Image (tube, grey):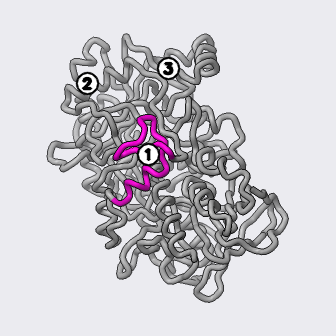
Amino acid sequence: MHTQTGSKLLGSFDYVIVGGGSAGCVLANRLSADPRVSVALLEAGGKDNWLWFHIPVGYLYCFGNPKADWCYETAQERGLSGRSIAYSRGKVLGGCSSINGMIYMRGQSQDYDRWADITGDQSWQWESVLPLFRKSESNWRGASAYHGAKGELRVERQRLRWDVLDTFASAAEQAGIHPIDDFNTGDNFGSSPFEVTQRKGVRCSAATAFLKPTLKRRNLTIITHAVANKLTLEGGQVTGVEYIHKGQTFCVKANRETLLTAGAIGSPTILQRTGIGRKEDLARAGVQLRHELSGVGHNLQDHLQLRSVYKIDGLKTLNTIANNWIGKMGMGLQYLLYRGGPLSMAPSQLGVFAKSDPGQPSANLEYHVQPLSLAKFGDNLHPFPGITASVCNLRPKSIGQVSINSNSPNDPPYIAPNYLSNDDDKQIAIDSIKLTRRIFSMDAFASHNPREYLPGTQYQSDDELLQAAGNIGTTIFHPVGTCRMGKVDDKEAVVDNELKLRGLSRVRVVDASIMPTITSGNTNAPTIMVAEKAAQLIACTAY
């Protein structure tokens, strides 16, 4: 591997990958495995050589930290009581996989069957993409019809348990939501501890999994601190990328293809700065239209989490451990000696997939249950023993957009998810809070006196509960869909079923932005699958 830190690149590469996040790391690995091709990977952030990128609980120090995070914020959201909220995106090799919650979740089979219908391509259906999930995976269970054992991405059980979470699972069962063994077989309804992308208590990011094995490949060049400005065009072809490094502008050429892997926020904004997008969006930012694609930056979908917090008696939570020096020292010693304990924690340990009402055909809610409570990530834990039951509507109908504010990559984009703008989403939010209250009212919790701290028992009517959802709602960091794929006659589709940008040659978009609809769960594993599929598509057309 060669690294480039500032001098203008000489010559060109067969493939230029724009974005060193999950998809970019997978593509860099797969494409450079062929010694006949040359590959360049551009990443706006730095190397993942900070300790907190690897200790699982390090996400607490990464969110809102410009060393690791783009530190975006949304527009003021009407559905969130007029609030603007933090919108973290990874800015480091590994991208969001270096700072995320590490949950390995594929979604449900119907998600991919729906993609197949939208694209008219059956290779996107569940049975077709399942081998791609297995290819990347090294699962603690070993090889099976659903799991891989020889892939780069390690998936393990978490290394600690909490009585308070076991109690929540028991209460959920009393409410009709039974335990299951595995969330990743296509039907998620039930409760189970989350499995995580870790190896022996250390985060297994996409950079660790897919880039680290490539360090000796001389045909891969990784350029960090390279902020992609725009694609370079010649006629109807994309020829490479213009990027900025330490205030200077450089260009890198792609002989075969440019692969845009900058994520659901980064990819559409790079296209827009290039002059590719909706005419009105570009005009507002003062960018000349070069190729009209009205779907660029639109169709933003995200999971809104409603974080209910309860005070609890008689059960240990992280609040009671971490709010004193003895507890903190004990946590550090546990991790140092055993790579276990609270420092090995993902943000959420218990998952529960449920229905917001019995009439739903399948699970449409996901709970992330945490043995802790705090106002928001980055803040101190509450001074009382607390548990957080965060619930997401898995298939939101509220659609937003991303657009540039200027032609400079240094200016943050306009991000408007439009949470709770759809009436169905509003009702599901109301029903979600009611279901959370029902679970805490079960006999399993009776001896522990749960008291609702957030949103608060003063919210009772449906109108009040909708107001409460707006007060406590926030992103769970799953933006997708802003360069969505679709059929040839779909005017809003940005890429086709092979992820090729419509109307221009030698360029594909390969990341969460291509998802036409959001998956029913966490989005990192699906993004890695998309990159695996793209690598196969590229290999089929390479020679």
User: 10 Å neighbourhood of mark 3: few (<14), some, or many (≥20)?
Assistant: many
**Which residue position holds label 1?**
148
User: 10 Å neighbourhood of mark 2: few (<14), some, or many (≥20)?
Assistant: many
Q: Quadrant of the N terminus?
A: bottom right
Q: Which mark is residue 171?
A: 2
For the residues bearing labels 1 and 3, Cβ distance under 8 angstroms? no
Vertical position of residue 410 compared to residue 329: above or below: below
Q: Earlier in the sequence, mark 1 or mark 2?
A: 1
Select label 2 or label 3 by which is in front: 2
310 relative position to 233: left or right: left
Identify residue type, mark 2: Ala
94 relative position to 185: left or right: right
Which residue: 46% across, 56% down? 529
For the residues bearing labels 1 and 2, Cβ distance under 8 angstroms? no
Which residue: 54% across, 61% down? 414
Marks 1 and 2, Cα distance to the nearest angstrom? 33 Å
Select label 1 or label 2 by which is in front: 1
Q: Nearer the viewer, residue 538 or 388?
A: 538
User: 10 Å neighbourhood of mark 1: few (<14), some, or many (≥20)?
Assistant: many
Q: Where on the picture, by quarter, is residue 201?
A: top right
Q: Where on the picture, by quarter, is residue 126?
A: bottom left
Q: Give the extent of the magenta segment.
A: 128-150
Q: Quadrant of the C terminus?
A: bottom right
**Which residue position holds label 3?**
319
Marks 1 and 3, Cα distance to the nearest angstrom? 37 Å
Select label 1 or label 3 by which is in front: 1
Q: Where on the picture, by quarter, is residue 218?
A: bottom right
Residue 109 percent location from the top left of the image:
30, 53
Determine if the magenta segment contains residue 473.
no
